[in-house]
Amino acid sequence: MLLELTTETDDASDLGFLLHKHPARVQAFEQSVGVAHVFYPEADERRCTVALLLEVDPVALVRGKGRGSRDSAFSLAEYVNDRPYAASSMLAVALGRVFRSAMAGRCEARPELPGREWPLEVRVPAVPCRGGVEAAVRLFEPLGWTVRATPVPLDPQVPAWGDSRYVDLHLTGTMRVADALSHLYVLLPTLDVAKHYWVGTDEVDKLVRAGEGWLARHPAREEIARRYLANRRVLADSAVARLAEVDDVLPDADDDSVAEEQPDDASTVDGDPGGDVQASADGSATPEDPATPDDLAATHDAEPEPEPGPTRAPLARLRVDAVVAQLRAVGARSVVDLGCGEGVLLRALLREKGVERVLGVDVSHRALELAARRLHLDTLPERVRARVELAQSSVTYTDARVAGFDAAVLMEVIEHVDPPRLGALEHAVFGAASPATVVVTTPNAEHNVRYPTLAAGSMRHHDHRFEWTRAELAAWAHATAGRYGYGVELLPVGEDDPDVGPPTQMAVFRRTEEGAR
Protein backbone atom coordinates (compact mmCIF):
# COMPACT_ATOMS: atom_id res chain seq x y z
CA MET A 1 0.00 0.00 0.00
CA LEU A 2 1.46 3.34 -1.02
CA LEU A 3 0.59 6.96 -0.17
CA GLU A 4 2.56 9.97 -1.38
CA LEU A 5 2.25 13.51 0.01
CA THR A 6 3.93 16.29 -1.98
CA THR A 7 4.33 20.03 -1.52
CA GLU A 8 5.83 22.48 -3.99
CA THR A 9 6.59 25.81 -2.30
CA ASP A 10 9.41 27.83 -0.76
CA ASP A 11 11.23 25.89 1.97
CA ALA A 12 9.40 22.74 0.90
CA SER A 13 11.87 20.56 2.81
CA ASP A 14 10.47 22.00 6.05
CA LEU A 15 7.83 19.33 5.60
CA GLY A 16 10.36 16.97 7.19
CA PHE A 17 10.33 19.01 10.40
CA LEU A 18 6.55 18.96 10.52
CA LEU A 19 6.30 15.22 9.91
CA HIS A 20 9.14 14.46 12.37
CA LYS A 21 10.82 12.31 9.70
CA HIS A 22 14.25 13.26 8.33
CA PRO A 23 14.34 13.44 4.49
CA ALA A 24 17.80 11.85 4.38
CA ARG A 25 16.78 8.62 6.10
CA VAL A 26 14.54 5.67 5.34
CA GLN A 27 12.66 4.71 8.48
CA ALA A 28 10.69 1.57 9.31
CA PHE A 29 7.91 1.21 11.89
CA GLU A 30 6.57 -2.12 13.06
CA GLN A 31 2.78 -2.47 12.76
CA SER A 32 0.43 -5.23 13.86
CA VAL A 33 -0.03 -6.19 10.20
CA GLY A 34 3.49 -5.66 8.89
CA VAL A 35 6.00 -2.83 8.52
CA ALA A 36 5.44 0.81 7.53
CA HIS A 37 8.31 2.47 5.66
CA VAL A 38 8.73 6.25 5.38
CA PHE A 39 11.08 7.75 2.82
CA TYR A 40 11.44 10.82 0.59
CA PRO A 41 11.67 10.22 -3.18
CA GLU A 42 12.54 13.92 -3.52
CA ALA A 43 13.34 16.67 -1.02
CA ASP A 44 14.74 20.07 -1.92
CA GLU A 45 13.86 23.69 -1.23
CA ARG A 46 11.19 23.84 -3.94
CA ARG A 47 9.61 20.38 -3.93
CA CYS A 48 9.33 17.69 -1.30
CA THR A 49 7.56 14.32 -1.45
CA VAL A 50 7.16 11.94 1.45
CA ALA A 51 6.02 8.36 0.83
CA LEU A 52 4.38 5.96 3.25
CA LEU A 53 4.71 2.36 2.10
CA LEU A 54 2.95 -0.32 4.13
CA GLU A 55 4.37 -3.79 3.64
CA VAL A 56 1.72 -6.22 4.85
CA ASP A 57 2.61 -9.55 6.41
CA PRO A 58 -0.35 -11.86 5.67
CA VAL A 59 0.59 -14.09 8.59
CA ALA A 60 0.64 -11.19 11.05
CA LEU A 61 -2.66 -10.07 9.59
CA VAL A 62 -4.48 -13.16 10.84
CA ARG A 63 -2.33 -13.96 13.88
CA GLY A 64 -4.44 -14.62 16.94
CA LYS A 65 -7.65 -15.38 15.06
CA GLY A 66 -9.49 -18.38 16.43
CA ARG A 67 -10.68 -21.43 14.61
CA GLY A 68 -14.15 -19.98 14.61
CA SER A 69 -13.39 -17.54 11.81
CA ARG A 70 -16.30 -17.17 9.46
CA ASP A 71 -13.97 -18.09 6.56
CA SER A 72 -12.64 -21.24 8.22
CA ALA A 73 -14.29 -23.42 5.55
CA PHE A 74 -11.53 -22.24 3.21
CA SER A 75 -8.23 -22.52 5.07
CA LEU A 76 -6.38 -20.14 2.73
CA ALA A 77 -9.10 -17.49 2.61
CA GLU A 78 -7.30 -15.24 5.11
CA TYR A 79 -4.15 -15.27 2.99
CA VAL A 80 -5.58 -15.00 -0.52
CA ASN A 81 -6.91 -11.45 -0.75
CA ASP A 82 -6.16 -8.09 -2.29
CA ARG A 83 -5.66 -6.11 0.92
CA PRO A 84 -1.86 -5.94 0.71
CA TYR A 85 -2.21 -4.07 -2.58
CA ALA A 86 -5.06 -1.63 -1.89
CA ALA A 87 -5.08 1.31 0.56
CA SER A 88 -7.63 0.57 3.27
CA SER A 89 -7.97 0.81 7.04
CA MET A 90 -4.53 -0.78 7.45
CA LEU A 91 -2.91 2.17 5.68
CA ALA A 92 -5.04 4.62 7.69
CA VAL A 93 -3.94 3.03 10.98
CA ALA A 94 -0.28 3.19 9.89
CA LEU A 95 -0.73 6.82 8.83
CA GLY A 96 -2.17 7.71 12.23
CA ARG A 97 0.69 6.06 14.08
CA VAL A 98 3.64 7.10 11.96
CA PHE A 99 2.54 10.74 11.62
CA ARG A 100 0.80 11.00 15.00
CA SER A 101 2.48 14.25 16.08
CA ALA A 102 1.88 15.94 12.74
CA MET A 103 -1.77 14.88 12.74
CA ALA A 104 -2.12 16.37 16.23
CA GLY A 105 -0.60 19.64 15.00
CA ARG A 106 2.57 19.46 17.14
CA CYS A 107 6.08 20.46 16.12
CA GLU A 108 8.34 21.49 18.98
CA ALA A 109 11.33 22.19 16.73
CA ARG A 110 9.38 24.58 14.49
CA PRO A 111 6.14 25.55 16.31
CA GLU A 112 5.08 27.88 13.49
CA LEU A 113 4.83 25.07 10.93
CA PRO A 114 1.63 23.28 12.10
CA GLY A 115 -0.48 26.40 11.55
CA ARG A 116 0.90 27.02 8.05
CA GLU A 117 -1.20 26.17 5.01
CA TRP A 118 0.68 24.17 2.38
CA PRO A 119 -0.04 23.52 -1.29
CA LEU A 120 -0.43 19.75 -1.16
CA GLU A 121 -0.76 16.85 -3.57
CA VAL A 122 -1.80 13.42 -2.38
CA ARG A 123 -1.52 10.28 -4.49
CA VAL A 124 -2.87 6.87 -3.48
CA PRO A 125 -2.61 4.57 -6.50
CA ALA A 126 -5.09 1.89 -5.39
CA VAL A 127 -8.03 2.73 -3.15
CA PRO A 128 -11.08 0.48 -2.69
CA CYS A 129 -13.93 2.90 -3.36
CA ARG A 130 -17.48 1.65 -3.01
CA GLY A 131 -19.59 4.05 -5.02
CA GLY A 132 -16.86 4.78 -7.52
CA VAL A 133 -15.51 8.15 -8.54
CA GLU A 134 -18.66 9.93 -7.37
CA ALA A 135 -18.12 8.75 -3.79
CA ALA A 136 -14.53 9.98 -3.74
CA VAL A 137 -15.57 13.40 -5.03
CA ARG A 138 -18.54 13.60 -2.64
CA LEU A 139 -16.39 12.89 0.40
CA PHE A 140 -13.18 14.82 -0.34
CA GLU A 141 -14.33 17.83 -2.38
CA PRO A 142 -16.23 19.66 0.42
CA LEU A 143 -12.99 19.70 2.43
CA GLY A 144 -11.21 21.86 -0.13
CA TRP A 145 -9.63 19.15 -2.25
CA THR A 146 -9.66 19.01 -6.00
CA VAL A 147 -10.31 15.35 -6.71
CA ARG A 148 -9.17 13.22 -9.62
CA ALA A 149 -10.16 9.60 -9.20
CA THR A 150 -9.38 7.30 -12.10
CA PRO A 151 -11.13 3.91 -12.08
CA VAL A 152 -8.82 0.92 -12.27
CA PRO A 153 -10.01 -1.60 -14.91
CA LEU A 154 -10.60 -5.18 -13.89
CA ASP A 155 -8.24 -6.27 -16.62
CA PRO A 156 -6.59 -3.80 -19.02
CA GLN A 157 -6.39 -6.59 -21.57
CA VAL A 158 -10.16 -7.20 -21.47
CA PRO A 159 -11.89 -3.79 -21.53
CA ALA A 160 -15.30 -5.45 -21.81
CA TRP A 161 -15.04 -6.54 -18.19
CA GLY A 162 -15.31 -2.91 -17.13
CA ASP A 163 -13.89 -1.17 -14.11
CA SER A 164 -13.09 -2.60 -10.70
CA ARG A 165 -14.17 -0.98 -7.42
CA TYR A 166 -10.69 0.52 -7.08
CA VAL A 167 -9.57 4.01 -8.06
CA ASP A 168 -6.27 5.78 -8.51
CA LEU A 169 -6.85 8.75 -6.17
CA HIS A 170 -5.16 12.09 -6.71
CA LEU A 171 -5.96 15.08 -4.46
CA THR A 172 -4.72 18.66 -4.62
CA GLY A 173 -5.47 21.45 -2.19
CA THR A 174 -4.03 24.12 0.11
CA MET A 175 -4.44 23.42 3.82
CA ARG A 176 -2.68 22.51 7.04
CA VAL A 177 -0.87 19.19 6.97
CA ALA A 178 -2.69 18.12 10.15
CA ASP A 179 -6.02 18.60 8.37
CA ALA A 180 -4.88 16.69 5.30
CA LEU A 181 -3.73 13.76 7.43
CA SER A 182 -6.94 13.64 9.44
CA HIS A 183 -8.99 13.69 6.21
CA LEU A 184 -7.05 10.69 4.90
CA TYR A 185 -7.16 8.88 8.24
CA VAL A 186 -10.96 9.05 8.31
CA LEU A 187 -11.89 8.89 4.63
CA LEU A 188 -9.67 6.07 3.34
CA PRO A 189 -11.52 3.41 5.38
CA THR A 190 -14.75 5.31 4.71
CA LEU A 191 -14.34 4.78 0.98
CA ASP A 192 -13.79 1.07 1.60
CA VAL A 193 -16.75 0.67 4.03
CA ALA A 194 -14.80 -2.07 5.78
CA LYS A 195 -12.02 -2.49 8.31
CA HIS A 196 -9.46 -5.14 9.08
CA TYR A 197 -10.51 -5.31 12.73
CA TRP A 198 -13.65 -5.48 14.85
CA VAL A 199 -15.66 -2.26 14.75
CA GLY A 200 -16.84 -1.47 18.28
CA THR A 201 -17.72 1.54 20.40
CA ASP A 202 -14.08 2.66 20.58
CA GLU A 203 -14.29 3.44 16.87
CA VAL A 204 -16.83 6.17 17.64
CA ASP A 205 -14.28 7.79 19.96
CA LYS A 206 -11.64 7.68 17.23
CA LEU A 207 -13.97 9.13 14.62
CA VAL A 208 -14.97 12.05 16.86
CA ARG A 209 -11.36 12.72 17.76
CA ALA A 210 -9.97 12.53 14.21
CA GLY A 211 -12.87 14.48 12.70
CA GLU A 212 -12.83 17.33 15.19
CA GLY A 213 -13.04 20.71 13.48
CA TRP A 214 -14.26 19.51 10.08
CA LEU A 215 -16.39 16.37 10.11
CA ALA A 216 -19.47 17.80 11.84
CA ARG A 217 -19.70 20.50 9.14
CA HIS A 218 -19.26 18.05 6.27
CA PRO A 219 -22.46 17.79 4.20
CA ALA A 220 -22.01 14.00 4.08
CA ARG A 221 -21.20 13.55 7.78
CA GLU A 222 -23.97 10.97 8.30
CA GLU A 223 -22.73 8.94 5.33
CA ILE A 224 -19.15 9.18 6.57
CA ALA A 225 -20.12 8.03 10.06
CA ARG A 226 -22.10 5.11 8.66
CA ARG A 227 -19.40 3.98 6.22
CA TYR A 228 -16.51 4.52 8.65
CA LEU A 229 -18.33 2.43 11.24
CA ALA A 230 -18.97 -0.40 8.76
CA ASN A 231 -22.71 0.28 8.50
CA ARG A 232 -23.36 -0.31 12.21
CA ARG A 233 -26.39 1.91 12.62
CA VAL A 234 -26.31 2.34 16.40
CA LEU A 235 -22.64 3.34 16.37
CA ALA A 236 -23.23 5.73 13.47
CA ASP A 237 -26.15 7.39 15.28
CA SER A 238 -24.02 7.83 18.39
CA ALA A 239 -21.18 9.31 16.34
CA VAL A 240 -23.47 11.82 14.60
CA ALA A 241 -24.91 12.99 17.91
CA ARG A 242 -21.45 13.40 19.43
CA LEU A 243 -20.08 15.20 16.39
CA ALA A 244 -23.03 17.56 16.61
CA GLU A 245 -22.15 18.41 20.18
CA VAL A 246 -18.44 18.81 19.48
CA ASP A 247 -18.87 21.25 16.61
CA ASP A 248 -22.20 22.84 17.51
CA VAL A 249 -24.40 21.60 14.67
CA LEU A 250 -27.78 19.94 14.62
CA PRO A 251 -27.78 16.14 14.49
CA ASP A 252 -30.32 14.34 12.38
CA ALA A 253 -30.97 11.74 15.07
CA ASP A 254 -32.37 12.10 18.57
CA ASP A 255 -29.42 12.21 20.94
CA ASP A 256 -31.59 11.30 23.90
CA SER A 257 -32.60 7.85 22.72
CA VAL A 258 -30.24 5.09 21.73
CA ALA A 259 -31.67 2.07 19.96
CA GLU A 260 -30.62 -1.43 20.86
CA GLU A 261 -27.57 -2.45 18.87
CA GLN A 262 -28.04 -5.19 16.33
CA PRO A 263 -25.27 -7.66 15.56
CA ASP A 264 -23.59 -7.11 12.25
CA ASP A 265 -21.32 -9.88 11.11
CA ALA A 266 -20.17 -7.83 8.14
CA SER A 267 -18.39 -5.43 10.47
CA THR A 268 -16.02 -8.18 11.63
CA VAL A 269 -13.43 -8.15 8.91
CA ASP A 270 -10.28 -9.04 10.81
CA GLY A 271 -9.16 -9.76 14.28
CA ASP A 272 -7.71 -6.52 15.69
CA PRO A 273 -10.21 -5.31 18.31
CA GLY A 274 -10.69 -1.60 18.66
CA GLY A 275 -8.62 -0.30 15.81
CA ASP A 276 -5.07 0.92 16.48
CA VAL A 277 -3.47 -2.22 17.88
CA GLN A 278 -0.12 -3.84 18.17
CA ALA A 279 0.66 -7.52 18.59
CA SER A 280 1.54 -8.66 22.09
CA ALA A 281 4.06 -11.35 22.91
CA ASP A 282 1.47 -14.10 22.71
CA GLY A 283 0.19 -12.93 19.34
CA SER A 284 -3.02 -11.36 20.65
CA ALA A 285 -4.01 -7.80 19.97
CA THR A 286 -3.53 -5.11 22.60
CA PRO A 287 -4.86 -1.52 22.53
CA GLU A 288 -2.58 1.26 21.42
CA ASP A 289 -3.23 5.00 21.53
CA PRO A 290 -6.55 4.81 23.44
CA ALA A 291 -8.91 7.75 23.36
CA THR A 292 -8.22 10.16 26.20
CA PRO A 293 -10.80 12.28 28.01
CA ASP A 294 -9.39 15.47 26.50
CA ASP A 295 -10.08 14.12 23.03
CA LEU A 296 -13.79 13.69 23.65
CA ALA A 297 -16.50 16.30 23.98
CA ALA A 298 -19.93 16.40 25.56
CA THR A 299 -23.04 14.76 24.16
CA HIS A 300 -25.85 16.35 26.13
CA ASP A 301 -27.28 18.61 23.43
CA ALA A 302 -26.55 19.61 19.87
CA GLU A 303 -25.95 23.14 18.69
CA PRO A 304 -26.61 24.61 15.24
CA GLU A 305 -23.78 25.53 12.94
CA PRO A 306 -22.33 28.96 13.77
CA GLU A 307 -21.19 31.57 11.30
CA PRO A 308 -17.80 30.75 9.76
CA GLY A 309 -14.97 32.40 11.64
CA PRO A 310 -11.55 31.87 13.17
CA THR A 311 -10.74 28.59 14.87
CA ARG A 312 -12.31 28.44 18.34
CA ALA A 313 -12.79 25.93 21.09
CA PRO A 314 -16.00 23.91 20.66
CA LEU A 315 -18.87 25.21 22.75
CA ALA A 316 -19.33 21.77 24.31
CA ARG A 317 -15.79 21.87 25.68
CA LEU A 318 -16.21 25.44 26.91
CA ARG A 319 -19.35 24.33 28.72
CA VAL A 320 -17.64 21.44 30.50
CA ASP A 321 -14.68 23.65 31.40
CA ALA A 322 -17.00 26.34 32.78
CA VAL A 323 -18.91 23.85 34.93
CA VAL A 324 -15.73 22.25 36.29
CA ALA A 325 -14.29 25.71 37.06
CA GLN A 326 -17.34 26.56 39.17
CA LEU A 327 -17.17 23.26 41.05
CA ARG A 328 -13.47 23.79 41.63
CA ALA A 329 -14.09 27.31 42.90
CA VAL A 330 -16.53 26.14 45.60
CA GLY A 331 -14.30 23.22 46.55
CA ALA A 332 -16.91 20.55 45.81
CA ARG A 333 -15.62 17.13 46.89
CA SER A 334 -18.74 15.19 45.85
CA VAL A 335 -20.78 15.91 42.70
CA VAL A 336 -23.94 14.43 41.18
CA ASP A 337 -24.37 14.94 37.42
CA LEU A 338 -28.13 14.92 36.79
CA GLY A 339 -28.82 13.90 33.18
CA CYS A 340 -25.25 12.69 32.70
CA GLY A 341 -25.84 11.25 29.20
CA GLU A 342 -22.76 9.37 27.97
CA GLY A 343 -20.62 10.63 30.85
CA VAL A 344 -18.43 13.38 29.43
CA LEU A 345 -18.70 15.61 32.49
CA LEU A 346 -18.08 12.56 34.67
CA ARG A 347 -14.81 11.94 32.85
CA ALA A 348 -13.77 15.55 33.40
CA LEU A 349 -14.65 15.29 37.09
CA LEU A 350 -12.56 12.13 37.51
CA ARG A 351 -9.55 14.17 36.40
CA GLU A 352 -10.16 16.59 39.30
CA LYS A 353 -8.02 15.46 42.22
CA GLY A 354 -10.21 17.32 44.69
CA VAL A 355 -13.38 15.46 43.68
CA GLU A 356 -13.64 12.30 45.76
CA ARG A 357 -17.09 11.04 44.77
CA VAL A 358 -19.06 11.32 41.52
CA LEU A 359 -22.56 10.06 40.73
CA GLY A 360 -23.97 10.07 37.19
CA VAL A 361 -27.76 9.92 36.92
CA ASP A 362 -29.79 9.53 33.75
CA VAL A 363 -33.30 8.39 32.90
CA SER A 364 -31.98 6.35 29.95
CA HIS A 365 -30.55 2.94 30.78
CA ARG A 366 -28.89 2.82 27.36
CA ALA A 367 -27.16 6.16 28.00
CA LEU A 368 -25.77 4.77 31.26
CA GLU A 369 -24.44 1.72 29.41
CA LEU A 370 -22.63 3.99 26.97
CA ALA A 371 -21.33 6.10 29.87
CA ALA A 372 -19.93 2.97 31.51
CA ARG A 373 -18.16 2.07 28.26
CA ARG A 374 -16.75 5.55 27.73
CA LEU A 375 -15.55 5.68 31.33
CA HIS A 376 -14.04 2.18 30.92
CA LEU A 377 -15.46 1.23 34.31
CA ASP A 378 -14.44 -2.40 33.84
CA THR A 379 -10.75 -1.54 33.47
CA LEU A 380 -10.33 1.54 35.69
CA PRO A 381 -7.89 1.19 38.59
CA GLU A 382 -9.82 0.31 41.73
CA ARG A 383 -8.97 3.58 43.47
CA VAL A 384 -10.52 5.50 40.54
CA ARG A 385 -13.42 3.10 40.07
CA ALA A 386 -14.39 3.56 43.71
CA ARG A 387 -14.98 7.27 43.11
CA VAL A 388 -17.72 6.93 40.47
CA GLU A 389 -21.23 5.45 40.41
CA LEU A 390 -24.02 5.39 37.84
CA ALA A 391 -27.75 5.29 38.65
CA GLN A 392 -30.97 5.37 36.65
CA SER A 393 -33.40 8.01 37.83
CA SER A 394 -35.35 11.09 36.73
CA VAL A 395 -34.52 14.68 37.61
CA THR A 396 -38.19 15.28 38.43
CA TYR A 397 -38.39 12.51 41.07
CA THR A 398 -37.22 12.71 44.66
CA ASP A 399 -34.41 10.17 45.03
CA ALA A 400 -32.46 9.64 48.24
CA ARG A 401 -29.41 8.55 46.21
CA VAL A 402 -28.80 12.08 44.93
CA ALA A 403 -28.90 13.67 48.40
CA GLY A 404 -25.83 14.47 50.46
CA PHE A 405 -23.61 15.79 47.64
CA ASP A 406 -21.68 19.03 47.80
CA ALA A 407 -22.83 20.01 44.33
CA ALA A 408 -25.33 19.02 41.64
CA VAL A 409 -25.07 19.79 37.93
CA LEU A 410 -27.82 20.10 35.32
CA MET A 411 -25.80 20.67 32.14
CA GLU A 412 -28.06 21.21 29.10
CA VAL A 413 -30.82 19.22 30.82
CA ILE A 414 -33.48 21.59 32.10
CA GLU A 415 -34.70 22.56 28.61
CA HIS A 416 -35.73 18.91 28.05
CA VAL A 417 -38.24 19.08 30.92
CA ASP A 418 -41.87 19.97 30.21
CA PRO A 419 -42.63 23.36 31.83
CA PRO A 420 -45.39 21.89 34.06
CA ARG A 421 -42.76 19.53 35.52
CA LEU A 422 -40.27 22.26 36.44
CA GLY A 423 -41.82 22.54 39.91
CA ALA A 424 -41.15 18.84 40.50
CA LEU A 425 -37.53 19.27 39.33
CA GLU A 426 -37.04 22.24 41.65
CA HIS A 427 -38.40 20.31 44.63
CA ALA A 428 -36.32 17.20 43.85
CA VAL A 429 -33.05 19.10 43.34
CA PHE A 430 -33.22 22.23 45.49
CA GLY A 431 -35.60 20.94 48.13
CA ALA A 432 -35.05 17.21 48.71
CA ALA A 433 -31.41 16.81 47.57
CA SER A 434 -30.44 20.34 48.68
CA PRO A 435 -26.74 20.41 47.73
CA ALA A 436 -24.65 23.40 48.74
CA THR A 437 -24.14 24.30 45.06
CA VAL A 438 -26.26 23.74 41.96
CA VAL A 439 -24.89 24.54 38.48
CA VAL A 440 -27.35 24.84 35.60
CA THR A 441 -26.48 25.51 31.97
CA THR A 442 -29.03 25.98 29.19
CA PRO A 443 -29.15 27.51 25.67
CA ASN A 444 -29.65 31.24 25.30
CA ALA A 445 -32.58 31.60 22.90
CA GLU A 446 -31.52 35.12 21.90
CA HIS A 447 -28.29 33.76 20.43
CA ASN A 448 -30.16 31.52 17.98
CA VAL A 449 -30.20 34.28 15.35
CA ARG A 450 -26.44 33.80 15.02
CA TYR A 451 -26.97 30.31 13.55
CA PRO A 452 -27.70 30.60 9.81
CA THR A 453 -28.77 26.93 9.59
CA LEU A 454 -31.45 27.39 12.27
CA ALA A 455 -34.87 28.43 10.97
CA ALA A 456 -36.38 31.49 12.60
CA GLY A 457 -38.50 30.61 15.59
CA SER A 458 -37.19 27.03 15.88
CA MET A 459 -35.14 25.56 18.72
CA ARG A 460 -31.69 24.03 18.65
CA HIS A 461 -32.87 20.48 19.30
CA HIS A 462 -36.15 18.77 18.51
CA ASP A 463 -36.46 17.44 22.07
CA HIS A 464 -36.21 20.87 23.70
CA ARG A 465 -39.44 21.81 25.44
CA PHE A 466 -38.40 25.44 25.65
CA GLU A 467 -35.38 27.71 25.29
CA TRP A 468 -35.06 30.72 27.59
CA THR A 469 -33.84 34.21 26.90
CA ARG A 470 -31.45 35.70 29.43
CA ALA A 471 -34.31 37.51 31.14
CA GLU A 472 -36.38 34.32 31.34
CA LEU A 473 -33.54 32.36 32.90
CA ALA A 474 -32.93 35.17 35.37
CA ALA A 475 -36.58 35.26 36.38
CA TRP A 476 -36.72 31.49 36.95
CA ALA A 477 -33.36 31.37 38.73
CA HIS A 478 -34.11 34.19 41.17
CA ALA A 479 -37.57 32.83 41.94
CA THR A 480 -36.22 29.32 42.56
CA ALA A 481 -33.34 30.61 44.65
CA GLY A 482 -35.73 32.63 46.79
CA ARG A 483 -38.05 29.67 47.39
CA TYR A 484 -35.32 27.28 48.49
CA GLY A 485 -32.81 29.50 50.28
CA TYR A 486 -30.14 29.99 47.65
CA GLY A 487 -28.31 32.91 46.13
CA VAL A 488 -27.71 32.82 42.39
CA GLU A 489 -25.12 34.17 39.96
CA LEU A 490 -25.73 34.31 36.19
CA LEU A 491 -22.71 33.82 33.93
CA PRO A 492 -22.05 33.55 30.16
CA VAL A 493 -20.51 30.46 28.51
CA GLY A 494 -18.92 31.02 25.13
CA GLU A 495 -18.36 34.33 23.39
CA ASP A 496 -20.63 36.96 24.94
CA ASP A 497 -22.15 38.67 21.91
CA PRO A 498 -22.82 42.35 22.75
CA ASP A 499 -26.22 42.22 21.04
CA VAL A 500 -27.63 38.74 21.74
CA GLY A 501 -25.48 37.43 24.56
CA PRO A 502 -23.59 34.12 24.81
CA PRO A 503 -24.67 30.87 23.13
CA THR A 504 -24.99 29.18 26.54
CA GLN A 505 -26.05 30.73 29.82
CA MET A 506 -25.18 29.46 33.28
CA ALA A 507 -26.85 29.86 36.66
CA VAL A 508 -24.78 29.02 39.75
CA PHE A 509 -26.87 28.56 42.90
CA ARG A 510 -25.21 28.66 46.32
CA ARG A 511 -27.18 27.79 49.41
CA THR A 512 -27.34 30.64 51.95
CA GLU A 513 -26.93 30.26 55.70
CA GLU A 514 -30.66 30.73 56.10
CA GLY A 515 -31.35 28.05 53.51
CA ALA A 516 -29.06 25.59 55.26
CA ARG A 517 -31.08 25.74 58.47
Image (cartoon, rainbow, N blue to C red):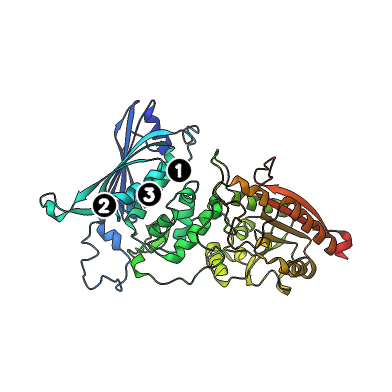
Amino acid type at circle 1 is Ser
**Circle 1 sits on which residue?**
101
Residue 86's tag is 2
In the displayed structure image, the side of residue 298 where residue 194 appears, left or right:
left
Q: Nearer the viewer, residue 193 or 304?
A: 304
Q: Nearer the viewer, residue 377 or 124?
A: 124
Q: Are marks 1 and 2 in contact (CB under 8 Å)?
A: no
- Where 189 sits versus 380, above or below? above
Q: Quadrant of residue 510?
A: bottom right
Q: Secondary structure at mark 1?
A: helix
- Where 52 sits versus 80, above or below? above
State whether residue 290 appears in this view: no
Amino acid type at circle 2 is Ala
Within 10 Å of the Cα at label 1, are there few (<14), some (14-19), or many (20+) other Cα atoms?
A: some
- Name the residue: 39% across, 49% down: 185
- x, y percentage for residue 303? 58, 53
**Circle 3 sits on which residue?**
139
- Which numbered disc, 3 or 1, marks the residue that appears first in the sequence? 1
How far apart are labels 2 and 3 at the CA level? 19 Å
Q: Nearer the viewer, mark 2 or mark 3?
A: 3
- Which numbered disc, 2 or 3, marks the residue that appears first in the sequence? 2
Q: Nearer the viewer, mark 1 or mark 2?
A: 2
Amino acid type at circle 3 is Leu
How far apart are labels 1 and 2 at the CA level? 25 Å
Q: Secondary structure at mark 2?
A: loop
How far apart are labels 3 and 1 at the CA level? 25 Å
- Name the residue: 44% across, 53% down: 221
Q: Residue furthest left?
A: 157
Q: Secondary structure at mark 3?
A: helix
In the displayed structure image, the side of residue 467 where residue 216 appears, left or right:
left
- x, y percentage for residue 74? 21, 70
